[in-house]
Each structure stands twice: as C-alpha cells, then as structure tokens.
C-alpha cells in the first residue's frame, strides 16, 4: 500500500471531454475545472489543442490531444502529420489509437513502425506519448504482442481504451499490460472509470494515469473518505 495526498491523486487524472459536439464554452469549463482541481491533463480532440494551450498557458496542466481518434483507421503518415500539427498548436501530450485492422492481421512490423514514427515526433518535441490499444476489440495474445512492441519502442504510456468502444478499462487488462511492459512503460486506464472505488482499484493494479470525465466526482468522494488529508491505496 502507498499513501497519497488528495493533490497527488488528482495528478493521476486526465480530465476528459472528447465529445464530438463539445462547444468552446465546454472546453473553457474543462480547463477551468482542471485548474481548480489540479488535474494532470485535459484530454481533448486535436482541434481543441490551441484553445486549451491558451487557456492553460500559465499553469502546469498538460494539453493532451487525441490522434486518429477514436478508430485508429488512418495511415501512418496521416497520424504523424496530425501529431505534428497537434504539437505545433500547443499539445504537450499525444494519445494515438493503433491501427486495429493491422493488429487483427498480425502485422506487427507495421504496428512497430507506426509506434516508432509517432513516438519519435513526440520525443523530438519533449511531448509525452501514449499508445491506445482499444482492448475491447483485442484478444489476449494481441494485447501481449502490442506490449512487447511498446517495451521495445518505449512510448511513455500504453493505454487501455478510447472510451468509445463497447467496453473500457478493466482491472485484468491493466494488470496484464503492466506485467508485460514492467517498469519501462507506464499504463493509463481509461473508459468507464466513474467512481472513487474503481479509480483506486485501477491505481492498485498498476495504472499511473487515469482518463475520465468523472474526475471531479472522484476527487470529491476521495476527500470525504480521506484521513488527515490522505488515502492509502
């Protein structure tokens, strides 16, 4: 068990609004909430990166752009261009979706090249990289194969889900992913994490970042159960 302050727990959270109909006012609200609660990042569609970078320019909150989202069905070249554009417009973190068709085809060389090219652009710009597996569509051996590629390429994080598939993060997937990447790559859990108990279980299972649109409710619930301002997980 490890003991965390409420602020340390808030820094696990990527505060998320990836709705296709998100208004500028909704994004302004998202950024203000992230600042008020001191979340680690705002997770937004790539087109919102510039607005978020302007709103959060005097803070330590990162701007996380979703790339090839939510399907992952664009070419490597398109993903690289979208990544570069997101960084140029203010993104400080990149969450991209793998090409799931190529996973199903067992085209591991393609997937390694895709990962290498996107991670390279991120590294060159000192931007955090996250690889979304979208586990709802994958078999266990496919998840393990992607973990092995990630262990070689070393993105900053591998991530369970977009939140747009039939199911999101599971404890079993977080444990599986952490087992196969070890300490060399971090794991982000996302999709369906809506309450404090699930949040704590994901961290206990090895997740070092949590993507959720329920961050405010989670932190408020944790504040109520904290003892002397801390929680042990």
Image (cartoon, rainbow, N blue to C red):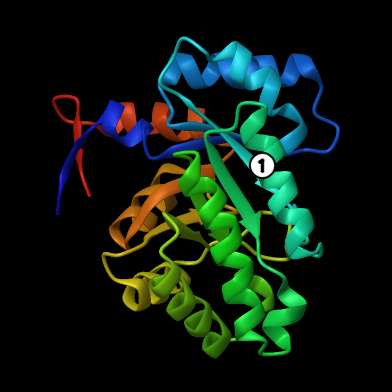
* Residue at which label 1 appears: 84
51, above or below 63, in the image: above
Q: In which quarter of the image is residue 52?
A: top right
- Does residue 66 appear anywhere in the picture? yes
Q: In which quarter of the image is residue 77?
A: bottom right
Residue drawn at (35%, 72%), measured in percent from left and top?
Answer: 181
Query: What secondary structure is found at the residue carrying circle 1?
Result: helix
74, above or below 126, in the image: below
126, above or below 233, in the image: above
Image spot of residue 209 (x, y percent): 41, 47
Image spot of residue 86 (x, y percent): 67, 36
Q: Quadrant of the N terminus?
A: bottom left
Q: In this view, does 11 lie to the left or right of 56?
A: left
Q: Is residue 180 left or right of residue 100?
A: left
Image spot of residue 11 (x, y percent): 36, 33
Residue drawn at (66%, 54%), measured in percent from left and top?
Answer: 163
Residue at the far right: name it: 21
Q: Quadrant of residue 207?
A: bottom left
Q: Which of 118 and 199 is in front in this view?
A: 118
Q: Nearer the viewer, residue 208 or 151?
A: 151
- Does residue 70 appear anywhere in the picture? no
Circle 1 packing at 10 Å, graded few (<14), some (14-19), many (20+), is: some
Image spot of residue 102 (x, y percent): 73, 80
Residue drawn at (43%, 53%), measured in percent from left and top?
Answer: 198
Q: How many marks?
A: 1
């Amino acid at each position: 068990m490890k003991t965390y302050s409420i602020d340390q727990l808030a820094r696990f959270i990527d505060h998320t609004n990836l709705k296709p109909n998100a208004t500028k006012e909704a994004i302004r609200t998202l950024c203000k909430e992230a600042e008020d609660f001191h979340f680690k990042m705002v997770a937004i569609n790539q087109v919102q990166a510039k607005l978020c970078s302007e709103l959060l320019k005097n803070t330590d909150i990162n701007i996380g752009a979703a790339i090839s989202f939510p399907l992952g069905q664009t070419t490597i070249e398109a993903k690289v261009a979208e990544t570069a554009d997101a960084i140029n417009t203010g993104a400080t973190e990149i969450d991209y979706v793998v090409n799931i068709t190529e996973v199903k085809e067992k085209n591991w060389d393609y997937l390694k090249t895709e990962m290498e090219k996107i991670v390279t652009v991120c590294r060159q710009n000192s931007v955090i990289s996250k690889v979304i597996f979208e586990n709802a569509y994958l078999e266990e051996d496919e998840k393990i194969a992607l973990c092995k590629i990630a262990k070689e390429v070393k993105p900053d994080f591998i991530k369970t889900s977009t939140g747009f598939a039939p199911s999101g993060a599971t404890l079993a997937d977080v444990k599986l992913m952490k087992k196969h990447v070890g300490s060399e790559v971090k794991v982000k859990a996302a999709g369906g994490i809506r309450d404090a108990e699930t949040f704590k279980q994901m961290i206990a299972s090895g997740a070092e970042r949590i993507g959720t649109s329920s961050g405010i409710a989670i932190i408020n619930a944790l504040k109520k159960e904290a003892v002397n301002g801390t929680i042990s997980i």
